[in-house]
Amino acid sequence: MLKISLAFLSMIRTVANWKLNGSRTFCKQWFKDFTSHFSGDLSSIAVAPPAIYIPLCTELSAHQINICAQNLDSLDGEARTGEISLEMLQDLNCNLSIIGHSERRHLFGETSNMIRDKLLKAAKPDFNAIYCIGENLADYEAKLSFEAITEQLNSELLSLSKNINLFVAYEPIWAIGSGKLPSKNEIELMHLHIKDLLLQHKHINLLGIFYGGSVTEHNCIELSQSDAIDGFLVGGASLSGKSFAKIASSFT
Ligand code: 13P
């Protein structure tokens, strides 16, 4: 079976987060639709299905598209009903996981300490995280976005001392599923801020900074032209293989 290498993963540009959507029929149709509308490099794509469909999606992608988990637990082999460990993901040749998505934080009570533990777990040479951060609407409106993001990074990532490979996904909470986005300039400034902070830490192997939150086939063109935006993490618009192919094509 093909082992995903780091060089392969560092080229990822567009990630589909299906959240709690999918079925075997959906997966089969999605890969058909996506591959018939996308002519770019398949290694620049990652798909995060619900964990139960990871093996099917790996098979349907013919090992050419990166398959990503939506979450992982910081432990393995404990009494933790319903959780999935990094070891289990790697057993399925899945070496990539979203960590710290705002839905995990707000709907499932994941705290900064829990996310820090998950990042610590993911800090392995052969594993890669897509670490999500974002400010809430109150902080955005009070012009405190930079402070909120700095605080998140300080408490969850920057104090880790283990080497970690990661993409950062900047996903303002108020932009997720709302149809509202920060301006291109606001996104660029935030990405540069994140990059500046992370580059001071030698143990962080920053693979790229993605934007996520209401990305569509209509607004992706302008954003993808920015040097500060390395890729997208897409929710709702990723559920159509055809729409997601259009978004992914904006980087080709
Ligand atoms: P939407 O693209 O639906 O706004 O979701 C973004 C997101 O949460 C991706 O992880």
Image (cartoon, rainbow, N blue to C red):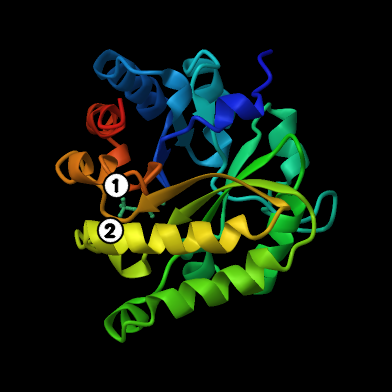
Q: Residue furthest right?
A: 77
Instruction: Say whether marks 2 and 1 touch (CB < 8 Å).
Output: yes
Residue at numbered disc 1: 236
First along the sequence among labels 2 and 1: 2
Q: Position of residue 89 (x, y in %)?
A: 69, 36
Q: Is residue 53 left or right of residue 214?
A: right
Q: Amino acid at mark 2?
A: Gly
Q: Residue at x 26, y 34 (%)?
A: 247
Height in image: 17 above or below 194?
above
Residue at disc 1, CB closer than 8 Å to ligand 1? yes
Q: Residue at x 42, y 58 (%)?
A: 192
Q: Position of residue 194 (x, y in %)?
A: 49, 61
Residue at numbered disc 2: 177
Q: Residue at x 72, y 68 (%)?
A: 159
Question: How far apart are the alpha carbons under marks 2 and 1?
Answer: 7 Å
Height in image: 156 above or below 18?
below
Residue neighbourhood size for the residue with mark 2, other residues' Cα within 10 Å, grouped as few (<14), some (14–19), many (≥20): some
Q: Is residue 31 left or right of residue 84?
A: left
